[in-house]
Image: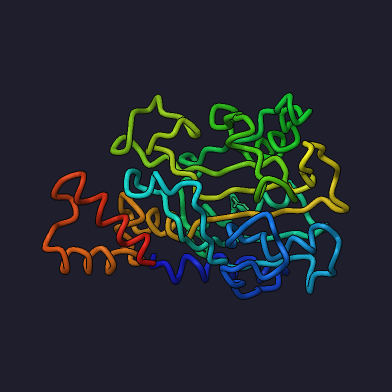
């Protein structure tokens, strides 16, 4: 499945579920936002809606947002999955549906062979927020309950801490506990003892569901937003690597031509040795 179809399947699925499809906003933040230099996620242009400052054109939105993050820049080229510039598909609820519906749709789209990505249900693992003393929040039992309700066994539900499963778009702002979907890519990518969240390659995180209900303040206070919202992020490049059955984002139809150009211009070959592979990946990522 080429990247174009990865995008279209997502956006049309959520359109059919009553979401308004909106175009990607600019990489330079389209709304006043001193917390970031560049747009880092699909939710960024919608912050005024989540805060209740502006009325959204619809309570359900879906988009494919061009995003840029420097947080992972040192990992680019070293892993199979990290990028700086990427596209993020998302479905958003502004005070409309919440956890149960987000969980149900994410599983449906992940597993449907007809209109989704056709993953085996047994290969999908889930992570859930396990609580954090500093934030004063306990484990997200509600989310665990919804994953159980759609049939995910406890063995494939992993509780993780704030670093992995509490999402904020910057040092301050709208945020909340999150729950991620991972695909187990099998023994070619690592031993069975690998687990989501342990920074190995066997389980690839492909979709993050943020249950956005707080506004983190500079002093650490965590007041509730006016509504309970959903903000999800699914990386197009990672999903393309899964649907195309290639080991890394760099071998997808999105990156193949850029890596090929790097090879042509340098006279080196991707895969020749680690340093060359890393360099060609970095050129492709930064070139985009
Ligand atoms: N806003 C959700 C994410 O970036 O993962």
Task: Count numbered badges in the picture.
Answer: 0
Q: Report the colour scheme.
A: rainbow
Please give left or right for residue 189 compared with residue 168 in the image. Answer: left
Q: Which of 253 and 117 is in front in this view?
A: 253
Q: What x and y, as percent, mark residue 34?
A: 69, 58
Q: Which corner quadrant holds the N terminus?
A: bottom left
Please give left or right for residue 191 compared with residue 65 in the image. Answer: left
Q: Within the image, what quadrant is residue 90 found in?
A: bottom right
Q: Which corner quadrant holds the C terminus?
A: bottom left
At horizontal 59% and vertical 62% (from top left) the residue drawn is: 39
Please give left or right for residue 36 compared with residue 52 in the image. Answer: left
Q: What x and y, as percent, mark residue 3?
A: 42, 67
At horizontal 46% and vertical 46% (from top left) the residue drawn is: 72
Residue occupying the far right of the picture: 226
Q: Nearer the viewer, residue 140 or 259?
A: 259
Q: What x and y, as percent, mark residue 69?
A: 51, 54
Q: What x and y, as percent, mark residue 99?
A: 74, 46
At horizontal 48% and vertical 58% (from top left) the residue drawn is: 117
Please give left or right for residue 51 compared with residue 196 in the image. Answer: right
Inspect this view and state whether residue 171 appears.
Answer: yes
At horizontal 36% and vertical 60% (from top left) the residue drawn is: 285
Residue 261 in the image: above or below residue 158 = below
Inspect this view and state whether residue 103 appears.
Answer: no
Residue 237 in the image: above or below residue 21 = above
């Amino acid at each position: 499945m080429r990247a174009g179809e990865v995008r279209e399947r997502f956006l049309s699925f959520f359109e059919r579920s009553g979401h308004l499809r909106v175009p990607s906003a600019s990489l330079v933040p389209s709304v006043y936002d001193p917390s970031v230099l560049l747009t880092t996620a699909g939710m960024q242009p919608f912050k005024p809606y989540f805060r209740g400052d502006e009325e959204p054109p619809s309570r359900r939105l879906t988009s494919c947002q061009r995003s840029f993050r420097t947080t992972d820049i040192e990992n680019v080229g070293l892993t199979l999955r990290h990028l700086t510039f990427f596209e993020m598909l998302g479905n958003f609820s502004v005070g409309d549906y919440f956890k149960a519906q987000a969980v149900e749709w994410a599983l449906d789209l992940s597993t449907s062979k007809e209109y989704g990505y056709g993953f085996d249900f047994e290969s999908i693992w889930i992570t859930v927020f396990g609580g954090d003393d500093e934030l004063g929040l306990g484990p997200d039992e509600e989310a665990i309950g919804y994953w159980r309700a759609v049939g995910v066994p406890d063995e494939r539900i992993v509780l993780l801490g704030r670093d992995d499963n509490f999402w904020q778009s910057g040092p301050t702002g709208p945020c909340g506990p999150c729950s991620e979907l991972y695909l187990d890519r099998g023994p070619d990518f690592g031993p069975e003892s690998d687990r989501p969240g342990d920074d190995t390659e066997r389980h690839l995180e492909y979709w993050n569901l943020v249950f956005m209900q707080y506004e983190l303040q500079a002093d650490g206070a965590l007041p509730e937003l006016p509504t309970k919202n959903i903000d999800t992020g699914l990386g197009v490049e990672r999903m393309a690597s899964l649907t195309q059955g290639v080991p890394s984002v760099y071998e997808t139809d999105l990156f193949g031509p850029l890596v090929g150009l790097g090879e042509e211009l340098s006279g080196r070959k991707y895969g020749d040795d680690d340093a060359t592979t890393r360099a060609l990946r970095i050129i492709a990522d930064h070139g985009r």
